[in-house]
Amino acid sequence: DDSVLWLLGDQLNPDLDALSDADAVLLIEAHGFADRKPYHAHKLTLVFSAMRHFRDRLRDRGHDVTYLRAESFGDGLDRFFGEEFAGAPGDADLRLMRPASHGAGDRFRELVAERGGSLELLDNELFWTTPADWHEWAGEPDGEAAGLIVGEDGSADRRYRQENWYRHVRRETGVLMDGDEPVGGEWNYDDLNRETPPDDWEPPERPRFDPDDLTRETHAWVRERFDTWGSDSLDGFAWPVTRGEARAALDAFVRDRLPSFGRYEDAMVEGEPFLSHSLLSPAINLGLLNPREPVRAVEVAYEDRGVEPGAYDPEEDGGIDPNATPLDDFGSGRASVAGAAPVPLNAAEGFVRQVLGWREFTRHVYREAMPALAAANRLEQSADLPPAYWDGDTDMRCLSEAVGHVREHGYAHHVERLMVLSNVALLYGTDPAELNEWFHLGFVDAYHWVTTPNVVAMGSFGTDVLSSKPYAASGSYVNRMSDYCASCPYAVSRTTGEGACPLNALYWDFLAENEETLRGTGRMGLMYSHLDDKSDSELAAIRERASTVRKLAADGEL
Ligand code: FAD
């Protein structure tokens, strides 16, 4: 029998173990999904261009690659077994790394079986931790069928806490560990990671991977073939589409952006969609980078260039605190990468936590909590997404900036996703599933396994499976973390009356509206005590303003 490795569009890694013993490779470019909804043109271009580049790379390396463009995977498999595969279907020993998307493995196995073949599912090498690793930490799911950990009302029978998982994985992998202790003595340095840059600070330049002929050709075809959303032009498209480019993107991040990554991780700045974020999620999620690579690269950078938490300040001349003592374990290493700034521990640790902690965590929560997770709607929210999410047309500066970044680049950084895009939708009362779909269509790094826990659970509090309280915030949070409010026509200092920041009234109204569910949940007590302090007339004015804001938003006039 021939062993054929079928690789999906998010498994584009030429160094997989699974490839080494495959006689042939199958790639199916299925298009039907993008006919049903308007995906961001850059997202479709990225995925299809990366697949086509990967095909060429494998062929250059001598692999026998069957590359099929089809409406659906079923159509692709029809052609594979009907025309492309030389033997009888039963002669193909088809293998596939377990897809990240819920139910896809079983569905594909059926599709293959219906055509007379068989499909073996292999472990997915493109995540660091396995389901078995997760169960070792979380315990077996009490014999419950997957998905039952989230009930129909969205309340979870089991709750998972990222911080505990993260510490467990740090211990297991030894990343940034000093024996049994975390390097530097603390697991988490986030108190140093909440600064906003001064006005004259220029973020490090974003590495650009200019579209080559194949990407341009793919983009032209995408525009012709699909109804898309977001920027139509390739001018702003700079994402890596090959493994070589992804490695270069990682090097550039570690060299240039990592030093200021932690410090400005939560900041939002007008006209600066990227700041010091790594911009690596599109490449990691396509499989171009194995998640171990960015984590190890950051660890090495810290060994070479590491300084104490907070000891590097990008705003200072030269950046290095002259009084900082080098860490015991590592030299100050300040000269080790020519021209590169030191890496303070809060930056290295903060990055490692995102990938090793959050990314792996959300993947397992998704696995465990699907299919209920996708439909969870604990707060019973049902509003349609306001039109401003599609056209970016709103006076609310925070929202127009964040939506603008998505329209332009298919990207907004984490705090814009959580504290603006999700937060506004949450306070407004949007159906979490609709918001999930919007994220899925609009972002270059979006896949069902990663948007669903982030959008439905974290952003919309559709279930409490991964957080005990909603990430809901009024205008004062946005004002603290950004420069948006300064140029916004709405007054962040006011809650009621015309011209008041819409987030303020929506926030208090949201708390009042969801009191039954939220008052008792962890850590909401303080906010409810503030709500309790409001007089009846204040509350009435808040509710009136909230209702006006909702109407304006629904009419596209906010
Ligand atoms: P950095 O800030 O540089 O972070 C480094 C890496 O950590 C990221 O590349 C990513 O791989 C990982 N990471 C960090 N946080 C998370 C997280 N919560 N879940 C998974 N991985 C994480 N991430 C996606 O990859 N795809 C999505 O579609 C997506 N949608 C999101 C929607 C919402 C509402 C929220 C709150 C978060 C979402 N995230 C998503 C997580 C996170 O915002 C992005 O991974 C990050 O902004 C990507 O940009 P970056 O590579 O510059 O990240």
Image (cartoon, rainbow, N blue to C red):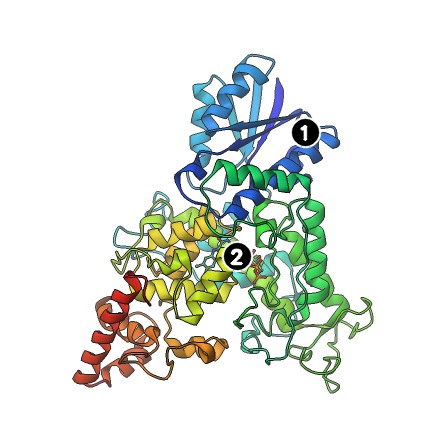
Callout 2: 10 Å neighbours few (<14), some, many (20+)?
A: many
Quadrant assignment, res 300? bottom right
Question: Disc 1 and disc 2: Cα gap in Å?
Answer: 42 Å
User: From what the image shows, is residue 523 above or below residue 56?
Assistant: below
Between 398 and 375, which is closer to the camera in this rendering?
398
Q: Secondary structure at mark 2?
A: helix
Residue 220 % position (x, y): 57, 39
User: From what the image shows, is residue 242 above or below residue 410?
Assistant: above
Query: Hey, what amino acid is under mark 2?
Result: Glu
Residue depicted at x 54% and y 56%: 409
Query: Hey, what amino acid is under mark 1?
Result: Asp
Position of 440 compared to 194: left or right?
A: left
Residue 509 % position (x, y): 25, 73
User: From what the image shows, is residue 287 above or below residue 472?
Assistant: above
Residue depicted at x 72% and y 58%: 251
Between 169 and 14, which is closer to the camera in this rendering?
14
Q: Quadrant of the C terminus?
A: bottom left
Q: Which mark is residue 21?
A: 1
Residue 389 % position (x, y): 39, 58
Residue 378 % position (x, y): 28, 58
Q: Which mark is residue 408?
A: 2
Residue depicted at x 45% and y 25%: 74
Residue depicted at x 47% and y 16%: 116
